[in-house]
Image (cartoon, grey):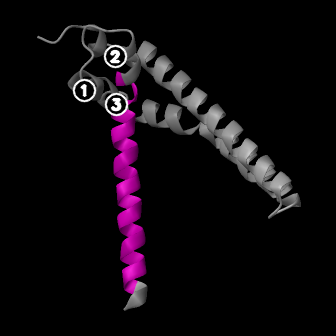
Amino acid sequence: SGHSFAGSRSTIVTVVRLAVLIVVQHFLVLFPAVAVDAPGAAWQNAIGDTRRHRWFVLAVTILPFIPVGLLFVAATPLLRVGPGTLIGLIAGMLWVGAMLLVAVTLGAVIASRLYQIIGDRLNVPLR
């Protein structure tokens, strides 16, 4: 019975991750619209704009992170030279910080470009 609990737990985690991904994709174009004070910067318009371009938004939000993830995975074993040492800890923290900086910057660029390309309703005032 422990095995079925682990299986159902992983299913729940997967469903929650997919739900979060969908929500993030719908609201991703809202952040740049709010930043530039667009007249239609509302969650309803963000969902409307992304819903019409669902597959494009999915591809644009996932594909750019594949090389970043591969780089992270490929270089991580190199940082295990001195595990448990202060230098190993510092090198690991710097590597994770650098990768987070790249990921956050890439996310901001993706959100801005998506808003520019598909943000039709976000640029029209709510009626």
Q: Which residues are magenta?
A: 4-30
Please, is residue 106 above or below residue 89 in the view? above
Q: Nearer the viewer, mark 1 or mark 2?
A: 2
- Given residues 22 and 105, the one toward you in this image is 105
Dividing the picture into quadrants, the one containing residue 31 is: top left
Q: Is residue 29 left or right of residue 98?
A: left
User: At numbered mark 3, what does the secondary structure look like: helix, strand or loop?
Assistant: helix
Residue at the spot of label 2: 34
Q: Position of residue 74 (x, y in %)?
A: 78, 51
Percent x, y of residue 26: 34, 33
| Looking at the image, residue 122 lies above or below residue 77 | above
- Residue pointed to by mark 1: 43
Residue matched to label 3 = 27
Real-space CA distance between mark 1 and mark 2, rounded to the nearest whole angstrom: 10 Å
Split into 4 quadrants, where in the image is the N terminus? Answer: bottom left
Quarter occupied by the C terminus: top left
Q: Is residue 17 magenta?
A: yes
Q: Tell which circle, 3 or 2, labels the residue nearer the N-terminal end.
A: 3
What's the CA distance linking mark 3 and mark 2? 11 Å
* SS class, disc 2: helix
Q: What amino acid type is highlighted by mark number 1? A: Trp
State the residue lying farthest toward the front: 86
Q: Are marks 1 and 3 in contact (CB under 8 Å)?
A: yes
